[in-house]
Amino acid sequence: MGLLIIIIAIVALYVWWKKTHYNDSPWVKNRIKGRSDDQKAVIRYFCNDSACLSKKPISDSEYEDIVRAFLNSNDFKKKALNKIGLDEDQVKEIEPVHFEGYLFDEDALAKAGEDGLWRSSKYQVSWLFFSDSQVYVYQYTFFLDEDGRKERTEEYFYKDITNFSTVSDTEEVAQYDPKQDKTVLVNVNSNRFAITVPGDRFYCSMEQNDYTEASVQGMKAKLREKKS
């Protein structure tokens, strides 16, 4: 009886230890070195198995909370105007438009959540402003699993713009494969807004909804007006 009690205690201790510790693979352990607590949580969200006996990674909603917290801590419209160097009164041809959404490319980790929606470790915010003669674009891209940030500004004359459009296409993105303990490329469907000029296209990540649909239609109407 005493031996049985000892065995049960050992098993219980093992189960407790497993449930309070992450089952990090060597790849994950290397990836989380030097990262903040939120960044470690993001990496584990994309790479650790929530079905195993070990401590579970954050949920889809908890990951979205991290994204939303970063968005709420930044005034991207103000950042955009400061970066472009214009006062809002100078760009009132139509209401400013903003797009945002997960960015899917080879530099991002990606995962299909329990709700079937794909999320990535990169997020992009874009603001567009409209003067009498030009369109000004500000874009901010940030990584959730590291400290990477990218800012970009562009200016386009209406006369040079061929089209405003939405694009639904397939992007290659890195997904962690626990069997190989590395990332592999998978195809993910994504939605983007595009400004087309001769020989080039400028893309903005976006979520398709009533706002983005109405905004794109409004921009198209303004472009037709400017070219008529």
Image (tube, rainbow, N blue to C red):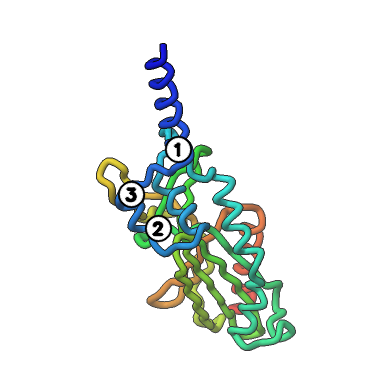
**Viewed as shown, does residue 107 lie left or right of 58?**
left
The residue that appears at 43% across and 44% down in the rendered structure is 22
Query: Mark 3 or mark 2, which has the lower sequence index?
Result: 2
Tag 3 secondary structure: strand
Please indicate, yes or no, whether residue 192 appears anywhere in the rendered image. no
Where is residue 134 drawn, in percent x and y?
Answer: 59, 83
Q: Nearer the viewer, residue 89 or 107?
A: 107
- Quarter of image, res 54: top left
Q: Are marks 1 and 2 in contact (CB under 8 Å)?
A: no
Q: Crowdedness of circle 2 by 10 Å Cα count: few (<14), some, many (20+)?
A: some
- Which mark is nearer the camera, 3 or 2? 2
Q: Nearer the viewer, residue 118 or 129?
A: 118
Q: Nearer the viewer, residue 118 or 205?
A: 118
Q: Crowdedness of circle 3 by 10 Å Cα count: few (<14), some, many (20+)?
A: some
Q: Separation of disc 3 and disc 2 at Cα?
A: 22 Å
Query: Mark 3 or mark 1, which has the lower sequence index?
Result: 1
Q: Are marks 3 and 1 in contact (CB under 8 Å)?
A: no
- Which mark is nearer the camera, 3 or 1? 1
Please indicate, yes or no, whether residue 30 appears anywhere in the rendered image. yes
Q: Which residue is mark 2?
A: 32
Which quadrant: the N terminus?
top left
Q: Separation of disc 3 and disc 1 at Cα?
A: 20 Å
Q: Is residue 183 above or below residue 91?
A: above
As drawn, the label of residue 186 is 3
**Viewed as shown, does residue 57 lie left or right of 10?**
right
Where is residue 170 drawn, in percent x and y?
Answer: 38, 53
Where is residue 137 drawn, in percent x and y?
Answer: 56, 77
Tag 1 secondary structure: loop
Name which residue type carries label 2. Ile
- Which mark is nearer the camera, 1 or 2? 2
Q: Which residue is mark 1?
A: 50
Which quadrant: the C terminus?
bottom right
